Amino acid sequence: MARLGTEIAFILRSLSSDSARMVRIEQVRTAYARAVRKVWSGNPTAVRLILKHTNAVYVRNDDRPRKGAAKGKPYIVCEVYSDDSTVRAELDTWQQILQLALAEQGVSFEEFRILPSKMGMKERHPFQKLLELDLAQMDTLLQQELAGAEEKGHAPVCDPSDLRRFVQAVGLTFGESAPSVLAKMNAVSLVPAASGDALGSERRPSSFRCTVFSTEDTFEMLMAHYRKKLCDNACLLGLRLRGLRVLPWNGSPDERAFPAVAALVADDTN
C-alpha cells in the first residue's frame, strides 16, 4: 500500500498551510480507524469502544532538544488521546501491533504515546459520525432497504451482510460525504467472482465483482479516483472486491439503492 506522503504530496503542495494541516489530520484519522479495525478485526465491540473513546489522534514532530545521535533530527510521535482508562490500557497492550498496522497505512513514527484526555478534549468525538454510519444508522437503513425489496417482490443482488460491509467501506472512504455518495447510487450488485461460488450457498463467496449503477454523469470519475481506497477499506472489513465498475442506470431515475439515505440527504439540502 502506498505511503500517505507519496499519495497526497502533490495535493498538499497546492494547499495553504491550514488546509494542508486539515487534510493531514483527516488522513491520520482515517489511517487510525482502519488500523484499529484491522488489529481488533475479531472483536467488533472493541473496535466500537476504542473509536468511541478516542478523542484525538495526532502525528507530529516532537521538537524538544535532544542529545546524542538524535540531536537535530526529526522525532515523529503519534499521540492518541482517550477519555477512558480501559481503552487506554487496551491500546497500551497492543501498541506495537497497532504501530505496525499504522505503518501499513503509511503513518510511521518513532514513539507511540497514549494519553488521557483533559478538559474540553473530552467533548471531541472525531469518529462519532463514522460509528453512527456503521452501526446504528446503516443497520436501520439496510433493514428498510431489505423490507422495501420484499414488498416490491424482488431481493437485492447482494447478501445483506455483504451489502452492509460495502456501506461501511463507503463510510470509511468518504467520511462525512458518504451519505451523499450513497444517495447517488441507483443500484448496487455484488456478484461472486469465482465460478464455483453462488449467492445463497452455504459457503460464503471468497470475493465479489461489484457493479454500481448511477444516473450521475460524474459518478464514474468519482469512483475512478477513490476505487482503490474503497476496495482496500472493503477488504479490511471482510469484503474482497475483485473489481468495481460503474455503469449508467437505465431504470427509473427515482430508483435508489439506498432510498432512506437519499431521503435523509434530500432533507438536509432543503
Image (cartoon, rainbow, N blue to C red):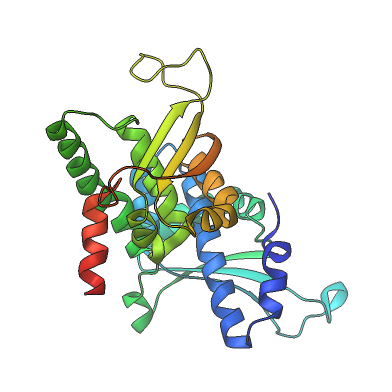
Residue 129 on image: x %, y %: 33, 63
Residue 119, image quadrant: bottom left
Residue 92 on image: x %, y %: 51, 56
Quadrant where the image shows the C terminus:
bottom left
Residue shown at the point (58%, 53%) measured from the top left: 224
Residue shown at the point (70%, 84%) measured from the top left: 64
Residue 175 on image: x %, y %: 42, 62
Please say if 156 is above or below 121: above
Residue shown at the point (33%, 34%) measured from the top left: 161
Residue 31 on image: x %, y %: 55, 58
Residue 122, image quadrant: bottom left
Question: Along the horizontal axis of the image, is 244 left or right of 82?
Answer: right
Please say if 189 is above or below 20: above
Question: Along the horizontal axis of the image, is 93 left or right of 107?
Answer: left
Question: Along the horizontal axis of the image, is 252 left or right of 242?
Answer: left
Residue shown at the point (33%, 59%) measured from the top left: 179
Depth order, front residue of 155/81: 155
Residue 13, image quadrant: bottom right
Please say if 123 is above or below 182: below
Residue 136 in view: no
Depth order, front residue of 182/215: 215
The residue at the far left in this view is: 151
Residue 231 in view: yes
